[in-house]
Structures are given as structure tokens and as C-alpha cells.
Image: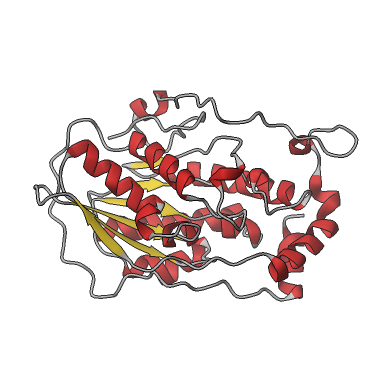
Amino acid sequence: MSGPCGNNARVDPLSASSDARKRRIAPQDDLPPCGRLAPGGYARSQMDTRIFTPIAMLQGLWLMQKAPRLPSPAGCSGRFGRGVAPLLRVVGVGDSCIAGTGVSDLRHSVTASYARQLQERWQCDVEWRVSGVNGATSGSILHNVAPGVAAAHVYVVSAGVNDAIRGVEPRRYARNLHRVFVLLRRKSPHSTILFGGLPPLEAFPVLPWPLRAILAQRARALHEAAVAVAARHQRVFGFRFPPCMQAHHFASDGFHPAEAACERWAAGLLDLWPPAVPPALPRLEPRTTQPATCVDRAPRRASRKRLQAAMVRRG
């Protein structure tokens, strides 16, 4: 129930399985080299960015006012297949990446792309649903999104980018993520959980330097916290993004993943799970009576004091 993921990166040891720890990602030729230089010739990733916090704070305020805001595509669910048993259910839980922000049709979101590739591999029907909210942090996912999701064979979880933006401490993020995993496992005790990882924020076109460097540092710290949390759970697998991403992998806002990125992301998740031979699928409990959360809900514009506190907290 594990495998390598794609895109020139390593699979995190998020499962107790020794097989998962041994797998590696196939190299990709179209990924550019990293290591942009800051003024003075120092590698940006190696500089102490704390001294640039005041500049980054102003950049964050400017982006909150000027950055384009993309809507999430319509819909909440779908199905791939021709009525061939067994039926698998994949449920996406998390932030705007789960909601499909950045793609024109929800069928091209990471959850639906994973479900389609899973159906193609196993030649059985796969039902998919998404419960994602724009701007959701690990805390809001825990309290407002995850409680209403349906039982599933596979959960795809995306959480962390908004935590990095808002300066959530790794300890708090880890606690929230752990509770999300526990909640999902209570809904479906035999489910597999695929943690989508945190992307390299230093590659996001919309983020200027030094803001991108500060947010990238936060994201790396949150990812390591997620690794530690997931190691405590069975059947949890995690994806590690490549260190660099090309511009065409991003939507028009320079922040959310485009269809090409979602397709490759889903392929990496598929390499994590499932195995080549379909396992015996447990019977799922009836769907939750609460509707799936897939609304185009733009995050609230943070006040100046709130953003300043977030930037200083991790500065």
C-alpha cells in the first residue's frame, strides 16, 4: 500500500512501512535548477531572512489588496468507470487546492485527477468528492471541514500553505493535523490517508522576495512537523514536492496549481498508494448526512494588525 511519487523528490517516511521509506521518485528533465541569488550573491535559501521581516510584511499587505482571487469551479463530486465492482471512494479534505481553485473544471483538480488515474490503474469504478475551502488553515479544516466529510477508502489531505501565510507555529499545526487524521480514521478505520505535502513557496511567481523566502522557511518547518505527526499513524503516506516548479505549473494568479500541476501531483500520490493488486476493500458506512463543503469562499482580508502579528511571530 505504498510506492514512489514523481517529480524529482523523495518520499517522506510517513508510514511505518519499510517499503515506503525505500522508494524514490523518478527524475524529471523539465524541472529547472534551483538557487536564485539574493542581492550580493548569497543564495536566498541560505540567508537569514528575519532581518527582512518588515519588508515582507509590507509585501504581504500589498498582495492581500492587489493579488487576483480566482473562484473555485462548480461541483462537489463525480465518478469514473463503467459500473464495474468494486467501487472505491476518494474524498479530498482541505484547502483551496482541494476545492479546485486554479483549474477551470473540478474534474481537473488533484482529487479528481487522482481518482481518474486510480480508476485507470484498477479498472473499477471510483467515486470522488471534495470538501475544500479557500483560505482554510489546519485549524479551520479540523473544526469546519473534516467533521462533515463522508467515509472513504482514501482521503487526500491538503493543509499547510495558509498556516505558513498566517504564521501558525509548527507545534500547533502538528496538533491540528494529528486531530484531522484521527477524525478521518474514526470515520473510516481502514482508510488510507494521503497527505499532499507543502509546495516550495519560494517558486511561487506571485510572491516577491524576501516574502517568498520567509514563507518558504515556514512551509519547510511545517512539512517536517507533518512528517513527525504522520509517522505516528498507520496507512498515512506523504508526498514531497520537488524543490522547483516551472511557471506553467501555476494558475493565472501565480499561486494555485494549474491543471498540469494537479495531474503530476495526482500521479505522485498514485505512486504512494495503491499497490499493483487491489486489496480487499472494506465496506463503508453510510454517507454523512452533512453536505460536502465545496464553496467558493474567499479568505477574509486580514487586518493590518493581524498580518503584522503573524509576520512578527515567525520573524
How many numbered marks have been drawn onto this rendered protein structure?
0
Q: Is residue 3 left or right of residue 134?
A: left
Q: Quadrant of the C terminus?
A: bottom right
Q: Is residue 58 left or right of residue 269?
A: right
Q: Position of residue 165 (x, y in %)?
A: 64, 59
Q: Is residue 243 above or below residue 52?
A: above
Residue 197 in view of the camera: yes
Q: Quadrant of the N terminus?
A: top left
Colour convention of the picture:
secondary structure
Q: In the image, what residue occupies the spot 9% across and 47% down? A: 84
Q: Position of residue 302 (x, y in %)?
A: 67, 73
Q: Is residue 191 left or right of residue 40?
A: left
Residue 199 in view of the camera: no
Q: Nearer the viewer, residue 68 or 89?
A: 68
Q: In the image, what residue occupies the spot 33% across and 66% down? A: 76
Q: Nearer the viewer, residue 139 or 83?
A: 83
Q: In the image, what residue occupies the spot 38% across and 37% down? A: 15
Q: Position of residue 34 (x, y in %)?
A: 68, 31
Residue lying farthest to the right in this orientation: 40
Q: Is residue 19 left or right of residue 29?
A: left
Quarter of the image for residue 5 reads top left
